[in-house]
Image (cartoon, rainbow, N blue to C red):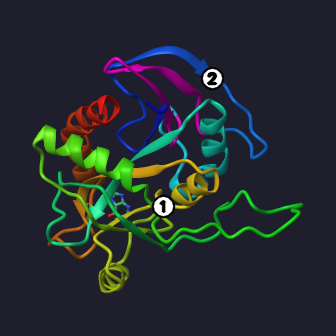
């Protein structure tokens, strides 16, 4: 079975239950990744783990060096990537605590280092990105979610916003009109960079708040943190299932 790397997002800077065999401090042509790449065993399976925002959590979404992260994981031997992302729920079905395995995305970010194909090049490369997520890996996530018996959606459109601020109500209305179901800040350029490196990539998104305007109040860090604390055990169980599958 291929070596799976897990990119842990907000709420998953540490993978409790991971037996660390090696901690790799890597440098890449694109700079340093957010943290050491951990190689070890999780649920009895070989795994690589990287904390997207560093450990402790300190790098905001727009300043993550996505290129270094993906390059380092590939260098460490990753053959597939499962990304864990905290998101806001746009669609009514995406309530707090819901899990979603998106099948599509729309990129609303700007100014991020978003390709390996720049600088001194011999030719111009345009990767196919019609289907940003790897279908086989998505199905493995879906199977693990089914086994776990949790509430989830096996499809969804992920809106990637720039952050670090949350969205305005009008921005969420626009994203909804665009067909987006969930909104996060870290799905891109991560997914595109994985494709450039020919690494199968899929996302497990945990809804941690209703998106702006989707509840009566404002969005608080306290509600996000509570949802993360409540949801991460399920996320870890699903990840174990994916590795076993
Ligand atoms: N918007 C963008 N990113 C997020 C949100 C949100 O509401 N919640 C968690 N990450």
Residue 175 visible in the current orientation? yes
- Graded by Cα atoms within 10 Å as few (under 14), some (14 to 19) or many (20 or more), the crowding at tag 1 reads few
Q: Distance between the residues labelled 2 and 1?
A: 28 Å
Residue 171 sits in which quadrant? Answer: bottom left
- Graded by Cα atoms within 10 Å as few (under 14), some (14 to 19) or many (20 or more), the crowding at tag 2 reads some
- At 47% across and 50% down in the image, what residue appears? 201
* Residue 99 placement (x, y as % from top left): 22, 52
Q: Quick check: is 48 in the magenta stretch? A: yes
Report which residue position mark 2 lands on. 24
**Magenta: predominant secondary structure element?**
strand
* Residue 242 placement (x, y as % from top left): 31, 36
Range of magenta residues: 34-54
Q: Which of marks 2 and 1 is nearer the N terminus?
A: 2
- At 41% across and 29% down in the image, what residue appears? 14
Some atom of ligand 1 lies within 8 Å of the CB belonging to the residue at label 1: no
Ligand 1 location (quadrant): bottom left
Left or right: residue 69 versus residue 233 is: right
In this rendering, the answer to whether 216 lies above or below 151 is below
Q: Is mark 2 on a helix, strand or loop?
A: strand
- Choose between 241 and 8: the one closer to the eye: 241
- At 86% across and 62% down in the image, what residue appears? 121
Report which residue position mark 1 lands on. 164
- Residue 199 is labelled as none
Question: Considering the image in quadrants, where does the N terminus appear?
Answer: top left
* Residue 182 placement (x, y as % from top left): 30, 66
Residue 204 visible in the current orientation? no
Residue depth check, mark 2 versus mark 1: number of the one nearer the observer: 2
* Residue 157 placement (x, y as % from top left): 34, 70
- Choose between 153 and 52: the one closer to the eye: 153
Residue 208 sits in which quadrant? Answer: bottom left
């Amino acid at each position: 079975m291929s070596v799976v790397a897990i990119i842990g997002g907000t709420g998953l800077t540490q993978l409790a239950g991971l037996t660390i065999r090696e901690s790799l401090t890597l440098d890449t042509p694109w700079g340093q990744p957010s943290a050491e790449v951990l190689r070890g065993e999780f649920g009895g399976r070989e795994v690589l783990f990287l904390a997207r925002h560093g450990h402790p959590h300190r790098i905001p979404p727009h300043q993550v060096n996505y290129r270094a992260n993906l390059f380092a994981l590939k260098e460490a031997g990753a053959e597939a990537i499962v990304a864990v992302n905290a998101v806001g729920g746009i669609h009514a079905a995406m309530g707090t605590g819901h899990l979603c395995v998106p099948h599509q995305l729309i990129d609303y970010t700007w100014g991020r280092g978003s390709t390996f194909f720049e600088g001194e090049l011999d030719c111009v490369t345009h990767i196919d990105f019609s289907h940003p997520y790897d279908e086989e890996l998505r199905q493995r996530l879906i199977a693990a979610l089914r086994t776990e018996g949790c509430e989830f959606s096996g499809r969804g459109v992920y809106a990637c916003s720039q952050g670090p601020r949350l969205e305005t109500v009008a921005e969420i209305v626009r994203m909804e009109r665009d067909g987006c179901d969930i909104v996060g800040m870290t799905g891109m350029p991560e997914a595109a960079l994985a494709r450039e490196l020919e690494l199968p990539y899929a996302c497990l998104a945990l809804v941690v708040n209703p998106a702006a305007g989707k509840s009566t109040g404002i969005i608080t860090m306290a509600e996000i943190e509570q949802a993360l604390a409540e949801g991460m055990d399920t996320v870890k169980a699903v990840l174990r299932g994916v590795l076993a599958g």
